[in-house]
Amino acid sequence: MKMNKLFLMTIFVCLLSAGCEEALERDISGQKVTLLAPVNNLVTTDTLHTFFWDNLDGANQFRLQVVSPRFDSIVKLIIDTALTKNTFMMDLDPKIYQWRVQASNSAFTSGFSDTWNLKIQ
């Protein structure tokens, strides 16, 4: 009898702790990141760019994706990386690009931001 109680308590603690992470994290799954720079539809000759977006409350990681020329017709995946900051600097070749960002924490992932365009001539 004593062994059964100990076993049940152990199971209960394990089940309880498995759900705690989600209970402690903010649910960001219905939100999306707001992009800031480079501005949408920018046409430039500058090749060095700092990608910048708003922090999302409850997020501790961001996924930046940059493709060429477009997400619906990817010829080249330029970058798909996880970051802990809301900025990323990179040098790009003259091409047409699209970029977007997704936020996450240990329990939830937001939707992707709007997709923005960038053309480097």
Image (cartoon, rainbow, N blue to C red):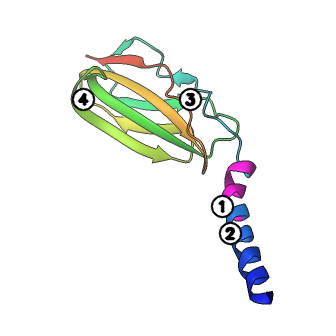
Q: Amino acid at mark 3?
A: Trp
Circle 4 — which element? loop
- Rendered image: mark on residue 104: none
Of all residues shown, which one is farthest toward the bottom?
Answer: 2
Residue 50: x and y, percent? 46, 32
* Residue, disc 3: 53
Q: Amino acid at mark 1?
A: Ala
Q: Amino acid at mark 4?
A: Asp
Q: Which tag, 4 or 1, sits closer to the chain's start?
A: 1
Q: Which tag, 3 or 2, sits closer to the chain's start?
A: 2
Circle 2 — which element? helix
Left or right side of 74 for 14: right
Q: Which tag, 1 or 3, sits closer to the chain's start?
A: 1
Confirm or deny contact between disc 1 and disc 2 (CB under 8 A): yes
Q: CA distance from mark 4 to mark 1?
A: 46 Å
Circle 3 — which element? strand
Residue 83: x and y, percent? 50, 46
Q: Amino acid at mark 2?
A: Cys
Res 9 → quadrant: bottom right
* Residue, disc 4: 93
- Rendered image: mark on residue 18: 1
